[in-house]
Amino acid sequence: MNEELNMRDDSAREASMNRERELATAFVDLADTYAPGFDPLRLFHRLVHTCRGLLAVDAAAVMIADARGTLKTMAATEEEAAFIELMQMQTGSGPCMDCYRTGRARRVPDIATERERWPALVPAMSAAGYRSLNTVPVRLHDRSLGALTLLNARTGHLPDGDLHLAQALTDSAALALMHWPTEPRGDDVVTRVQSAIAAKSALETAKGMIAAYHGLPVHEAGRLLADYADGHGVSLADTAQALVGRTMELAVILDGNENETAGS
């Protein structure tokens, strides 16, 4: 009996240590603005995928606001999650919009009960397979920059610990964005946020260009572009901008990945 209890204690301690290591790694990855090829596209990608990996959620997406206060989706773990963000942006209503405007987290344990408040959002979430939503602000000190959305396929409250961790991870990402080495005189919040949004816009354009050139689905073009940047140790944002600016040939993306695969 004692041996069994000791084994359980050892397993619990090991699980706790693994969790601590995962958390430490997550915060270091988000804060490492001096890593080669760091850019805001990677930053927000890491944020949403870290949240899905560490928290009791099925999907995550993050939006930030441009200079006019219009929210833009920067990253999402699933296309369905990105669509939920788009729905709220188009209608101008939803928990994510409320979170951004107030700078406070919102919890919606059962989206089906909110049909009267958000008549467009509720059926869209249901069709996508999501039944509950939590959102925390992307903020720099007391300034709201956007919102992080956490989606679940089941009803119920997200544990308080997970919600607090989501806020801490999001705060870390916002601070990292402010240390991103962007263009000269880019030290103010608005300039850095606008630069991040411009990088995301260039990425979407580049994905479309690659898809059209190689006859691929857009999501596959995005994967090829990300793989190329990873394989060559270059910034994803810079690579996308080079393609859009025609200073880099579209054929290089597919050829570069094939050469990388052949050489491995």
Image (tube, rainbow, N blue to C red):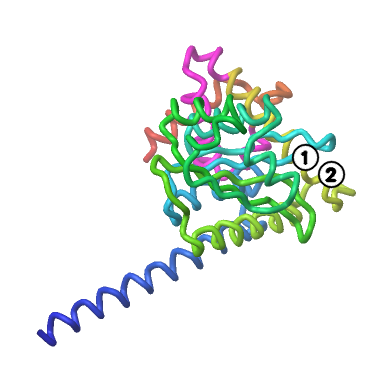
| Residue 154: quarter of image | top left
Residue 231: within the magenta? yes
Other residues around mark 2 within 10 Å, as few (<14) / some (14–19) / many (≥20): some
As shown in the figure, which amino acid type bears the numbered disc 1? Answer: Ser
Which residue lies at the image location 55% right of the left edge and 13% below the top edge?
213
Q: Main secondary structure of the magenta part?
A: helix
Q: Is residue 34 above or below residue 119?
A: below
What kind of residue is marked 2? Thr
Furthest-left residue in this view: 1
- x and y percentages locating residue 211 in the rendered image: 53, 17
Looking at the image, which residue is at 33% across and 70% down? 15
Which disc number belongs to residue 191?
2
Secondary structure category for the residue under label 1: helix
Q: Residue furthest bottom?
A: 2
In the image, what residue occupies the spot 44% across and 36% down? 130
**Residue 76 location (% of width, % of height):** 54, 38
Q: Identify the residue under disc 1.
A: 195
- Density class for disc 1 (Cα within 10 Å; few <14, some 14-19, many ≥20) is some
Task: Tell whether label 1 touches label 2 (CB within 8 Å).
Answer: yes
Q: Is residue 230 magenta?
A: yes
Q: Which residue is at a point 69% across and 34% down the rendered structure image?
A: 72
Left or right, residue 239 beside residue 76: right
| Residue 254 visible (yes or no) | no
Look at the image and tell me in which quarter the C terminus lies: top left
Q: Which contiguous range is marked in magenta?
A: 210-239
Is 172 or 160 nearer to us in this picture? 160
